Image (spheres, rainbow, N blue to C red):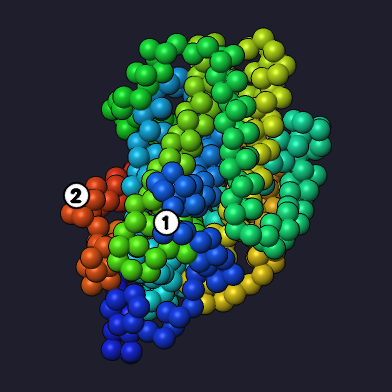
Amino acid sequence: MIPFFQPKNAGAGTDSSVGGTAAHAHKSLPESHGTVPIPSHLGFWRKMLAFSGPGYLVAVGYMDPGNWATDLAGGSRYGYSLLSVILISNLMAILLQSLCTRLGIATGRDLAQACRDQYSRPVSIALWMVCEIAIAACDLAEVIGSAIALNLLFHIPIVAGVVITGLDVLLVMYLTNRSFRHLEAVVVSLILLIGGCFLVQMILAQPPIREVLKGFIPTTQIIRNPEMLYIAIGILGATVMPHNLYLHSSVVQTRKYEPSAAGKREAIWFSTLDSTVALMSALFINAAILIVAAAAFHKSGTVVDEIGKAHELLAPVLGTTMAGILFAVALLASGQNSTLTGTLAGQIVMEGFLDIRMRPWLRRLITRAVAIVPAVVVAALQGESGTARLLVLSQVILSLQLPFAVIPLVMFTSNRKRMGEFVSPRWIQVLAWLTAAIILVLNVRLLYDVATGPR
């Protein structure tokens, strides 16, 4: 075990399993914990519908404005080649999110709480700080994306749009006073809106199917080309998001399933199915963004590193102003959707690591303020080009935070003393550690490239 993740002394009244201390009485998201009933008499389809929801909250993080920046840059520069990175990243996400459902349902603890149970106070605080950086980076992408969308649709200046995004705390205040199912319904509706917009754009772009399918096959060029690798790691960071691991292990506990072993096993199965289906929708949207960028810009040699530039060029390239409008509408929906789940993630990590409760709207205000400051400064000094670079950088930062969430998650779900009969099967453990190793290697390579040469 690496020194940073040394567990705290078990002699201070701490049981090695997750249910062993009095502190474990605190529930994750207590205001929503077990509020969605799952009647045992329901048939398969109705039960699947009852469990559906948390996976879509997680999927939102896989299609936020940060994904747009990396997907647009990847598609316009390298055609369909990076579709393989999107596919592999999505498969990694499905695996890791399945571990989150296993941890949350089997132990009744979210990932942040499990870290606080296992590690010393200094290590827990360090992990919390790393996670907060990740959430701030994600929120930065949401701020910039929403501001750009407002500019494209209503010609509101970027700086003013960045400030306006701070008002979305009012939406959070309203939704957090409703039932958790209301929040899920809003999220799913916005996902359907985003997917519909890109489906139309895909039809308009008419990409060559053979080249698209070929793009899903990995090539060594991705590793050998430093600039291509930089974008690829940005895609990885935008797809497998660290704070989503904390979020998912908590929101699966909003379901009131049978607390028996059989009930938990069924809950794990249905929750994993929910997240897998939801993440496939994220795969479609991310792939669609890259495909539209590749079909519209790559062959002409037009490099699109800015979301605003993509909007401006789509209409003449695809032959209709509808393409640009749909692009901006989907971008705005994406930014607002990510706002909702970012609030929950911030609340979960703060309560889980530090055992501190804060009202969601106040938590949102603090997180958004941290993101607004750099966005306003960069937008004022460098305009849209600066915000575009900041978007891609935010996704690389997210990727660098991944190991600090992935390694504890894999360790916990592979530990029989902690998980009991719900410990991950050996083959899942092997795949999970392989995923963690790939993430570590890619991050080391990225750091090396950044340190040895200008980007």
Name the amino acid type tagged 2: Trp
Q: In which quadrant of the rendered view does residue 91 lie?
A: top left
Q: Which of the pair 234/208 is nearer the observer?
A: 208
Observer-nearest of 250 and 44: 44
314 relative to 100 in the view: left or right: right
Where 253 sits versus 125, above or below? Answer: above
In the depicted view, which residue is nearer to us: 424 or 42? 42
Give the CA separation, mark 1 to mark 2.
Answer: 33 Å
Give the percent coordinates (x, y) of residue 377. Answer: 71, 49
Counting other residues with Cα less than 10 Å from the Cα at mark 1, is it few (<14), some (14-19), or many (20 or more)?
A: few
- The answer to which of 233 and 172 lies nearer the viewer is 172
Please name the residue that numbered disc 1 is placed on.
41
Q: In this view, does 272 lie to the left or right of 421?
A: right
Give the residue at mark 2. Answer: 427
- Who's the residue at 59% across and 14% down the image? 204
Q: In which quarter of the image is the N terminus?
A: bottom left
The single residue placed furthest to the bottom in the displayed view is 12
Furthest residue toward front:
41
Closest to the camera, between mark 1 and mark 2, is: 1
Judged from the image, the secondary structure of the residue bearing numbered disc 1 is loop
Q: Is residue 3 visible?
A: no
